[in-house]
Amino acid sequence: MKPSRAEQIFNYVILTLFAAFALLPILRVVVLSLQPETIGGEGFLHFENYAKAWEQGHFSEYMKNSVMVAVLVVTVALILSLASGYVLGVLRPPGEKILFFVFLLGIMVPSEAIVLPLFFDMRALGLIDTIWAIALPQIAQSLAFGTFWMRAFFRGVDGSLIEAARLDGAGNVRILTSILLPIGLPAVVTQVVLTFMWTWNDFLIPLVMSPSGTMRTAPLGLAFFQGQYTQGSTLLAAGAVLVALPMVILYFILQRHFMSGMTDGAVKG
């Protein structure tokens, strides 16, 4: 039944209030980042705050580290998730349910519970203060979600498409790359966005796995920048905007596929 005009207006009002509640803190940070550093300073729109925060907070190095870690984690986790999701969702070998529940453990176990044992394992391998010490644990965590996500998508694909491809002589790799990937682009983009967001925002693993600070990432650098500029909220706000900007850009570029993937996933789930 189609909602009445009053119900539509009420829904729009509620959604607007929720959107305002979510966006106002973000807008406040942006406005604060453009204010003068000193009280009573003249003018507005001080874009030089971003340049000053970038230089004083060494964000060029931290952002480079974050980009390298995020690209490595997203790429490896996506490739492995596609493979494991295809095996568990399409091929369904004997014991696939047991394997699936093993992957689910990676979603259920929090990072705080395993980060110290992982630190000693990485130190024994000589990987501490390297990109691998930060990336490998996050690849494992992202793979757990990616397997769950891609398995659900592959199980929702019409089996006749796969059977027709097999009758034409296509192997598993060809079926995955030429048939399932094109129709699964929204699901793939959703995983890429979520994995990038989780990796970019992760604080605990870079803090523990790089005790010397040689592989300090952007959120970790922002925390140390806050310690240096507890009195300078303007530069701190500018640093926060700089750290959040790559995620915002990525989301706006991929938002159409991301929303489609989330909607399809909700319907199939």
Image (cartoon, rainbow, N blue to C red):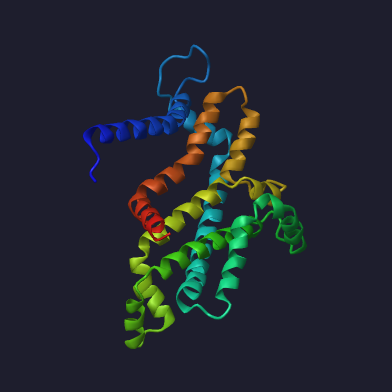
Q: Going 72% across and 58% down the picture, which residue do you hit?
A: 118
Q: Position of residue 146 (x, y in %)?
A: 51, 62
Q: How many marks?
A: 0
x and y percent of residue 167 in the render?
Answer: 33, 87
Across and down, in percent, residue 269 comes to 43, 59
At a point 73% along the width and 55% down the height, the residue shown is 119
Please tell me whether residue 241 is drawn above or below residue 36 in the rendered image: below
Along the line of sight, which residue is nearer the eye, 223 or 265? 265
| Residue 178 appears left or right of 97 | left
The vertical placement of 231 against 266, above or below, is above
Residue 111: x, y in percent? Answer: 65, 52
Which residue sits at x=48%, y=32%? 50
**Where 40 falls versus 18 (above or below)?**
above
Residue closer to the observer: 93 or 231: 93
Using residue 170 as the reference point, say whether residue 117 is left or right of it: right
Out of 200 and 154, give the one closest to the viewer: 154
Q: Which quarter of the picture shows residue 262? A: bottom left
In this rendering, would 187 be left or right of 207? left
Please name whichever residue, 97 or 146, is drawn nearer the observer in this view of the structure: 97
Q: Residue at x 36, y 76 (%)?
A: 159
The answer, for residue 64, to whether it is visible in the render is: no
Is residue 78 in view? yes
Q: Quadrant of residue 132?
A: bottom right
